[in-house]
Amino acid sequence: MAYQALYRVWRPQNFQQVVGQKIVTQTLKNSITTDQISHAYLFAGPRGTGKTSCAKIFAKAINCLDSQDGEPCNHCENCVAINENRLTDIIEIDAASNNGVDEIRDIRDKVKYPPTQAKYKVYIIDEVHMLSTGAFNALLKTLEEPPAHVVFILATTEIQKVPATIISRTQRFNFRRISADDIAEQLIHILTEKNISYDDQAIAVISRAADGGMRDALSILDQVLSFGNDHVSLENALEVTGDADDQSLAHYLSAIFNQNVTEALQTINTLFADGCSANRLIEGIIELLRDLLLQKNDAQLLTQMSYRQLDADLITAAAQIQSAQLYQMIDLTNEIQLQLKNSAHSELFLEVMTVKLANVAKTAAPVSEGAAANQAEVEKLQTQVAELKQQLSKLENHGVAVSPRTTMPKASTPVHKTDVKINRQQVYHVLENATKESLTAVRDVWPDLLSKLTPAKRAMMKVSQPVAASADAIVVAFTYEFTLRTATTDQDLQDALKQELNALMQNEADIILVQKDQWPKIRKEYIATLRQGKTEKPTTQATPPAELAQPTIVAEATKLFGDKIVKVEAN
Amino acid sequence: MKASLETLEQHFATVIAANELSHAYLFVGATNSGKMTLAQWIAQRLFCTNVKDGQPCGECAECRRIEEGNNPDYLVIQRATRTIGVDEIRGLKQELSKSGLEGRQRVFVIQDADKMTPAAANSLLKFLEEPASQVVIILTTTRLARILPTIQSRLQIVTLQSPTLATREQAIQQLGVDSTFSHVLSTTQFSLEDIQGWLEQVDAVQLQQTFWRWLTQILARKDSAFTLVQTQILSTFKEQKLQQLLPDLLLAALSDLFTVKFALNRPLNWTNQQENLQQFANQFSTQQVTALLEIVLGLRSMQEANVSFQNVLEYTTLRLLVVLA
């Protein structure tokens, strides 16, 4: 006896065995018990959901000599004959190969002869969407008023191709996709019957990859079984379906969220080399993005709707991403999935997608910062710009001989021995001309710039970030003072940075290095300087000057010990 | 499931030994990845009279007849035309309903099953699900997405790894092509005969020069690239086969640009253009490089939609220039 595919062996033989179509089977059973059998049925639904199986069971049930509750007995003469495909009254027609008018005429002619053995003559017309228009129309009259002993069952995956006139003459049953849970349950049932052990996760992978089709699930299971010695392992399941494991996917998305394009590209290339199918990869990514979206909006819902545990690192990485960006990413991934169908270069498509996804993660990042910044700050900046303008015109009028800016900053500079010397003049100059647009532009190219440096330099610059930019210079802040000091002394690095930046931005901008902790202070001082330049005017700005004058060391001490203990004494 | 030809032969050897061979398979893989070899191996394994260690001997009469295509129980449907119509499938189905002429088992192969028209594919559905006699049906394709989902769900899908190109590259070199170009050609879908066919008509060196002159002008943001399409490219890439080659060359070059830009750890296609590409990569932003690649990826589908070659090229040139401007 030749080997039979699982989906053939486990084809349901009665309504109860049909998985995931409760409504359909119940209705059919009821119609049999109450003796309300219609003369024409139309079974529609996606592949592998049980249309043909139900048609066969129904044909059996109405002809069964010993039918119980609408179920066929599978023992009586008729049932056995039907199971063995030798009852001539059940006529299964493949509409895809018999799609012409002639074949339908043939049916029409033979319909009037009564059944030979069974009670009903059942015509099962499978793949009915392939009938030609002429054939459909030839069928209309027969379908509307067939002799009492005839039942038509039409089955199709593509209901939209069936004319409305056919649909209106039949009772239509919609077969739904089978839920992953139902598929998993059936798989487990089969494996238990066959006495084969399995990994729970493997079952989850298979039932997900089956995409609502029981036959798909069983085909995959068949293949997994032929692969691995009587045990359904996760590894084999992943290999057969071409799915990526959850960890790699999480790693990939984290890299994208952190805008680490190179890392993401490497991950996807490794996955591809390991045999993942591009299509399954994209589907995995979409699912993961959806899960993140759920997690962002309602973590409770996630546990209900998803079988997988979200990686903690991924959640952290996704914190900086907004829902709108996730939507955008899902759209983009979907689009690539469609394009993928027409191309043999799926690897390149995935790479393009990776860069685009990282771009989505990037572009909105400054915006989110802007949204987070409070309105007051924006107003403050606006007033500052107005003040700056005034000052500029004043300077133009009175000359620059005794510019307060050259003396004042020194007065208010806090005493901080370890400070790397910062060229405040330069920084102020940048701040004077700084615009949001130039900053965004610089931040845009920053990762590109970094990727061009040698690894050692890149490692050093990893902890830095552009914080202000004007047309002719940018200010870069370092998180650690140590790196700042190394960077300031490293002329080589500075040259390389400037050269790359100029190439990317196509301008002649200088680079000024500062420390991140100090940056807010420098900015404040700059504002203070501005204000001191025009003390006559009453200021409505928030920050009191006293606080500004307070050196950071004092502020730090106060933070540590509380202001009751710390006393500031001038000596 | 994705594996190399050798691994798969091993796999099927165990499957057949355990009598678990399914009735229908779909072999997916790039051209030259050995889909037909595997199909033939299965047939030989099933029919061979002298199986040793699960491997067919390759010498007995059965094995030889299969190799020569003389075994009536091993039937290959293979069409040079663009589609496989419903008539051909009908012919196959008649054969399918008969039992083996000599043995009990029969093996049918439909090569490039994606060529099947919707009608043809649909008419195969019922037979794929429950073939009447004892048969193994093998479909092969290069693009899984082109196969109807209803067909896919009836088959066991086996993906073959892309072949190592070293031998192919050598074979092309022996036709008198320089090493870089033969490396690029080895990654394309064209058969050795095809390549030999062009070489009789055009000079490989000149072909490369023209191509790179055009591409360099595009990358250098020179509008004159547009006129090059009419003056040089069209006259050089005259043959229809050559016209199908151009998108592959372009794709190879731009994916190299991408590789260089992101410093990916993989060999270039156009190894001799590394410096050239590096220079351009420095000038472009990552977004630009990605956009270029994306445009070129869409080229093939334009050609398949029967847009004329000149239009495709002109349109592409302009779009590439716009991205770089």
Image (spheres, grey):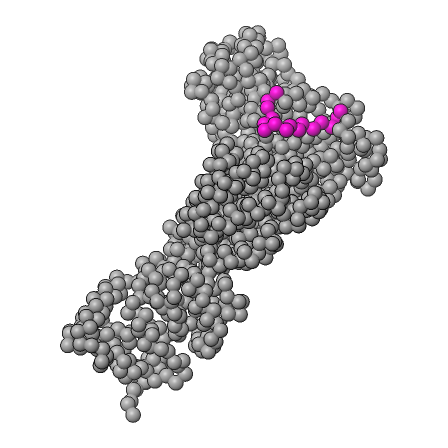
- The residue nearer to you, when weighing A130 against A414, is A414
Q: Which residues are magenta?
A: B72-87
Residue A410, given in percent of the width and then of the height, sits at 29, 83
Please name the residue shown 53% across and 70% down the image: A456
Looking at the image, the residue that sits furthest to the bottom is: A571
Q: Quadrant of residue A477?
A: bottom left
Q: Main secondary structure of the magenta part?
A: loop
Looking at the image, the residue that sits furthest to the front is: B231
Image quadrant containing the N terminus of chain A: top right
Q: Quadrant of residue A392?
A: bottom left
- The residue nearer to you, when weighing B258 against A288, is B258
In the shown orientation, is residue A369 left or right of residue A482? left
Image quadrant containing the C terminus of chain A: bottom left
User: Is B74 colored magenta in this rendering?
Assistant: yes
What is the total number of numbered labels drawn onto the structure image?
0
Residue A53, given in percent of the width and then of the height, sits at 57, 26
- Residue A196, above or below A461: above
Residue A322, given in percent of the width and then of the height, sits at 39, 54
User: Is A349 colored magenta in this rendering?
Assistant: no
- The residue nearer to you, when weighing B253 against A442, is B253
- Residue A197, above or below A559: above
- The residue nearer to you, when weighing A62 against B129, is B129
Residue A430 appears in view: yes
In the shown orientation, is residue A481 left or right of residue A469? right
Please name the residue shown 15% across and 74% down the image: A537
Residue B2 appears in view: no
Please name the residue shown 26% across and 63% down the image: A378
Q: Quadrant of residue B2?
A: top right
Please name the residue shown 45% across and 46% down the image: B224
Residue A110, given in percent of the width and then of the height, sits at 57, 9
